[in-house]
Amino acid sequence: MEHTPLRPPRRALLVFLDGVGIGPGDRAVNPFAAASLPNIRALLGGRLPVTEELDARGRIVSAGAILAAADATLGMEGVPQSGTGQTSLLTGRNAARVYGRHFGPWVPTALREMLAAENLLRRAADAGRTVAFANAYPIALIDADPRIFRRPAAPPLAAISAGALTRDVPQLVAGEAVASSITNDRWRQRTAEVPPVSAEQAGRNLAGIAAGAEVTLYAHYDTDHEGHRGGMDGSVAALERVDAFLGGLAGALAPDTLLVISSDHGNVEDVREGHTLNPVPVLAIGPGREALARRIRTIADVAPAILGALGIPFEPEAAT
């Protein structure tokens, strides 16, 4: 049974986790079943995001959250990929259909103009809302050598189009940015100026960033990386880091904020293969979660649902 709807959100935070699907809860192959994930379990009322826990509507409903399973195949043959999947997630367009096939790992050139014009951050900014991209990025290196950005992921492209790629080392040092890997370990290999940060504190830092904007995006990629290369041990470690991060985030999030956590395709939930055909989780927490969950069928429904929760129009003719 669903709970009485909360007041509409004033803000929204989209946390993108690369390569996270919903698969059977077999401890031998699914790191979600093997890992210690107390915060995810708490959010889902003691359950895990595995196939056996979904109800007849493809959901897990708890007192404080709703998880909806979203199709990532988008009606196209083949295995979903990051370039078209991330573009679909952030624009509300079926990018695989527009492009003619699934494509990745980066956003293909033919889709970049659409992504720049129609992504979640750009639409919110065009509607007069304040936006933020929480990730720290080596902006100075990109400015010095644009070739670094020749095969980009969708989140930084979306941020650039909205004027939101603004956080670098100074913001990371001040706790006003979050590393894509959650902790600062990789940044510290580059510069000792960056302090260490726990996954829990990184989550609290993200909550603080989200409190200063009306629409915020944060992107994490290690789940997909470990799904490809880390095996069970690497994947379990990645998920446990995400769990600690989400615990810090959820505990510090402003009560007027709708938190949405989603992905572009499956991968880390099955260590026997790479990308999967599994649906991906769309986990909604906070005000507006019931209405958002009702709109979710595919990953292309996520951006329109977030915009709708904030009262920002999404033109039906732009959707597929």
Image: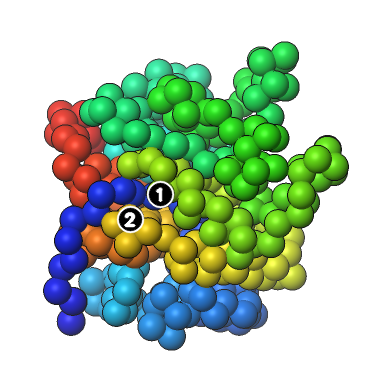
Residue furthest to the front in view is 174
Q: Is residue 266 left or right of residue 113?
A: right
In the image, residue 220 lies at what x, y percent?
Answer: 57, 49
What residue do we see at 61% from left, 65% from top?
A: 200
| Residue drawn 57% across the image and 69% down it | 243
Horizontal and vertical percent position of residue 141: 72, 22
Residue type pointed to by label 2:
Thr
Query: Can you say which quadrant of the picture contains the N terminus?
Result: bottom left
Mark 2: few/some/many CA within 10 Å (<14, 14-19, 20+): many
Residue 257 bears which disc, if any? 2
Q: Is residue 135 visible?
A: yes
Residue drawn 40% across and 18% down?
113
- Marks 2,1: beta carbons within 8 A: yes
The residue pinned by badge 1 equals 211
Whether 238 is drawn above or below 47: the answer is above
Residue 76 seen in the current view = no
Foreground disc of the pair 2, 1: 1
Relative image position of residue 131 (x, y in whole percent): 38, 35
Amino acid type, callout 1: Ala
- What kind of element bears circle 2? strand
